[in-house]
Amino acid sequence: MLSARSNGGILAGVLLCVFIWGGNNAAVKFTVQTWGPSVLASSRFLCAALLMLALLHWTDWLGKPVTLNAKLRRDLWLRGGLGIAAYVLVFNYALVFTSASNVALYVATSPVWALVWEERPAVNWRSAQRYGAALLALAGVMVLFWPALDFRGDRWLGDALALFSAVLWTNYGRQCRRLGEHLSGAEMTAQNMWRAGLMLAPFAVLEVALKGLPWHWKVAAAHSYTVVFGVVIAFALWGNALRHWPTSKVYRFMNLIPLSTAMWAQATLGETLSPNFWPAMLLIVAGVVLGQANWQRILGNRFQPAE
């Protein structure tokens, strides 16, 4: 069975996701230049879902599927399917206009939005910690976004879409947390994916009608990587982690995805980093660390600020 119960197994799975998604981001950046964002998203999800559903039906590799009731089917459409469809479409369009490393860095702000989302502002230390973390992350976003504010090209649009995709990714993680109470990570991923693929299919058909679908073996190979590794393997592991760990804890590992993406993009695409990348990453990571840190454990009870 793919699911790992121990913390060590979950940690290993999340770190593998970091490596896989770095390559996935570079692969999507490569393929989106030739095939449209909607075509990539819809075909990727449909192919991956069919593969995973076949494995769930014919083997025990991914565990045993459960019987879906009416409420769970509805939630899979309105929470999981719609959530991941919206995220990946915005994410793919962001890659049309800006670099893979920039998109990955914007999405890395997700742990901060998850922290803020989990708790409304209050007059206490924990709330100040969370919202202070959000301000640091926003400062990092502004440092990264600043060069695009001259509006001379399309980078500003790509950066804005990437930031929006971070919020959508946070929302999807929260929906997975709920759905994971009833489904394994693998089955939840498969069920969400085929629904998302169908939702995006009309956009994909329109895209093909307007722009065509030129065939290239390298593009097909990169797309296959995003299906098998970027979806089937990575999303199953990620979904499994969300079943057992809080959303904010899982999302802290997204700090490593920009580094993984930058290495993959440099090695495969020859992409260079923006001069603002490292200062922005430092601020974003600082925000995530501030938001996640257990100051009571670090400083001791007597140093913990009173709420």
Image (tube, rainbow, N blue to C red):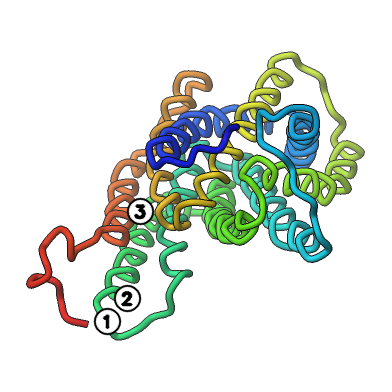
Please provide percent x and percent y for residue 13: 47, 34
Q: Which residue is mark 3?
A: 143
Q: Is residue 42 above or below residue 145?
A: above
Q: Of 275 and 295, which appears nearest the observer?
A: 295
Determine which of the numbered discs, if any, sits on residue 127 in the image.
2
Check whether the beta carbons of the residues at disc 3 and disc 2 lie within 8 A of each other: no
Classify mark 3: helix, strand or loop. helix
Q: Is residue 263 rendered to the left or right of residue 157?
A: left
Q: Which mark is residue 59?
A: none
Q: Position of residue 184 (x, y in %)?
A: 63, 46
Q: Name the spot of residue 145 as percent of width and height, x first.
A: 43, 53
User: Which numbered marker is on residue 124?
Assistant: 1
Where is residue 212? Give x, y as percent.
87, 31
For residue 260, side relative to residue 30 (left or right)? left
Q: Which amino acid lies under the numbered mark 2 shown in the image of this protein?
A: Ser
Residue that sits furthest to the left in the current view: 302
- Which amino acid is tagged 1? Asn
* Mark 1 residue crowding within 10 angstroms, few (<14) / some (14–19) / many (20+): few
